[in-house]
Amino acid sequence: MGRAADRQPGPGSARARGVHRAGRHTSGAALDVARVIVRRAERRVVELFHDGLVTNPALQQYLNRLSSLLFVLELSENRAAGTNTTAAGAIKKDLPNEH
């Protein structure tokens, strides 16, 4: 945790002001933000599961499926808006930094 993409946006940040990445439609960007939040929750639930504080494995599965759904909806929304978003480009931003 602690990646820049996972942190809450500050009040003056581009995300907080509703600015989205170039080439993305506003609704696609909103779905992207929702997916980032769900993935953060998913990682936290995995930690809690390993610590024995969450015992229902279906919660992890649900959050994982929700994240996948949001991803597909984002791609679909961007395509419908005429933007050229590829699955490979969207997946790349979820990978950890190599620093």
Image (cartoon, rainbow, N blue to C red):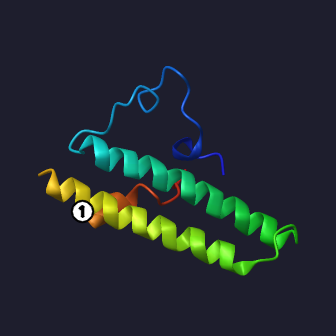
- At 45% across and 47% down in the image, what residue appears? 33
For this rendering, which residue is in front, 89 or 38?
38
* Residue found at the far left of this picture: 82
Say whether residue 81 is left or right of residue 27.
Answer: left
Residue count near mark 1 (Cα–Cα under 10 Å), binned few <14, some 14–19, many ≥20 = some
Depth check: 47 or 89 in front? 47
Side (left or right) of 98 relative to 41: left
Left or right of residue 16: residue 19: left
Residue 21 percent location from the top left of the image:
30, 39
Q: How many marks?
A: 1
Residue ID at (24%, 56%): 77
Give the answer, above or below, for where 39 lies relative to 55.
Answer: above
Q: Nearer the viewer, residue 97 or 85?
A: 85
Q: Amino acid at mark 1?
A: Ser
Q: Which residue lies under the disc numbered 1? A: 76
Horizontal and vertical percent position of residue 11: 53, 22
Residue 89, placed above or below residue 57:
above
Residue furthest right in the image: 52
Residue 30, compared with residue 53, is above or below; it is above
Residue 88 picture location, percent across and down: 30, 65
Helix, strand or loop at mark 1: helix
| Residue drawn at point x = 87 percent, y = 67 percent | 53
Q: Position of residue 17 (x, y in %)?
A: 41, 25
What residue is at 38 percent from the left and 45 percent from the top?
30
Displayed quadrant of residue 45: bottom right
In the image, farthest residue toward the top: 12
